[in-house]
């Protein structure tokens, strides 16, 4: 499976989620792939926010190589699942969807933890390092569930 995470600037939440998931996939020996992107161009081409990098590094995850990019229509073709952080991203992705099949791939990331709740992942950008820490832990818990789902999906495929 190919998993895409989407946030606003692609410098905080989605690159942290990507780094967390990639590490869990490696530890689980899974070959699934992941990437992240955003919807605002302010930070396109930038590496992740220093605070996102600092918190991730504390947990052994290196996200420094990531380069921010925008969501594009081809992402619907290139990814099997598209996880958004909040309703603004859900709305923006839905505006670019070409079909119902495109939208079947899209869900709120925290619905993995709290099904059908459509809860947002807190945007830490305007806050302090503690907010980044809280966001990191939310992302980590959601990615734990995702890896378990991918494990059973891959097993069923064999
Ligand atoms: P992210 O956080 O969407 O988690 O990467 C943000 C980064 C930048 C901005 C907003 C949110 N911004 O407005 O520049």
Image (cartoon, rainbow, N blue to C red):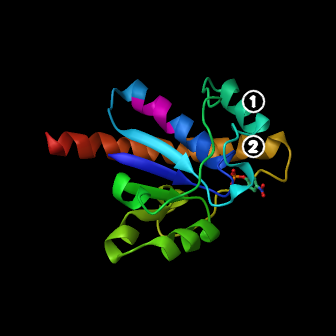
* Residue at (65, 29) in percent of width and height: 64
Q: Is residue 122 visible?
A: no
Relative depth, front residue between 82 and 77 = 77
Q: Is residue 119 left or right of residue 131?
A: left
The dot on residue 54 is 1
* Image height of 17 relative to 108, above or below: above
* Mark toward the start of the polypeptide (1 vs 2): 1
> Would you identify the image quadrant in which residue 49 lies?
top right
In the image, 81: left or right of 15? left
Question: Magenta stretch: residue 24 in it?
Answer: yes
Q: Nearer the viewer, residue 110 or 77?
A: 77
Q: Which residue is labeled 2 in the image? A: 132
Residue 56 visible (yes or no): yes
Q: Secondary structure at mark 2?
A: helix
Please tell me which residue is depicted at 43% across the width and 56% down the height of the picture. Answer: 75
Residue 155 to residue 62: above or below: below
Q: Is mark 1 within 8 Å of ligand 1?
A: no
Q: Residues within 10 Å of mark 2 (few under 14, many from 20)?
A: many
Residue depicted at 38% across the width and 63% down the height: 105
| Residue 148 percent coordinates (x, y) | 37, 42
Residue 144 magenta-drawn? no
Q: Are marks 1 and 2 in contact (CB under 8 Å)?
A: yes
Instruction: Report the span colored magenta.
Output: 21-25
Q: Quadrant of ligand 1?
A: bottom right
Percent position of residue 84, x then y: 54, 60
Label 1 and label 2: CA atoms lie apart by 9 Å
Q: Main secondary structure of the magenta part?
A: helix
* Viewer-side residue, 23 vs 70: 70
Residue at figure coordinates x 66%, y 42% from the top left: 136
Residue 78, label in figure: none
Q: Secondary structure at mark 1?
A: helix
């Amino acid at each position: 499976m190919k998993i895409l995470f989407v946030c606003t600037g692609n410098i905080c939440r989605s690159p942290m989620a990507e780094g967390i998931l990639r590490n869990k996939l490696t530890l689980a020996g899974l070959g699934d792939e992941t990437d992240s992107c955003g919807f605002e161009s302010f930070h396109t081409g930038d590496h992740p926010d220093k605070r996102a990098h600092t918190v991730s590094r504390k947990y052994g995850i290196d996200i420094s190589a990531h380069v921010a990019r925008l969501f594009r229509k081809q992402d619907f073709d290139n990814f099997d699942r598209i996880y958004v952080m909040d309703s603004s991203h859900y709305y923006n992705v839905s505006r670019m969807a070409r079909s119902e099949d495109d939208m079947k791939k899209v869900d709120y990331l925290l619905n993995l933890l709290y099904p059908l709740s459509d809860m947002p992942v807190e945007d830490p950008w305007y806050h302090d390092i503690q907010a980044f820490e809280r966001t990191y832990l939310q992302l980590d818990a959601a990615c734990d569930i995702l890896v378990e789902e991918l494990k059973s999906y891959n097993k069923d495929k064999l």
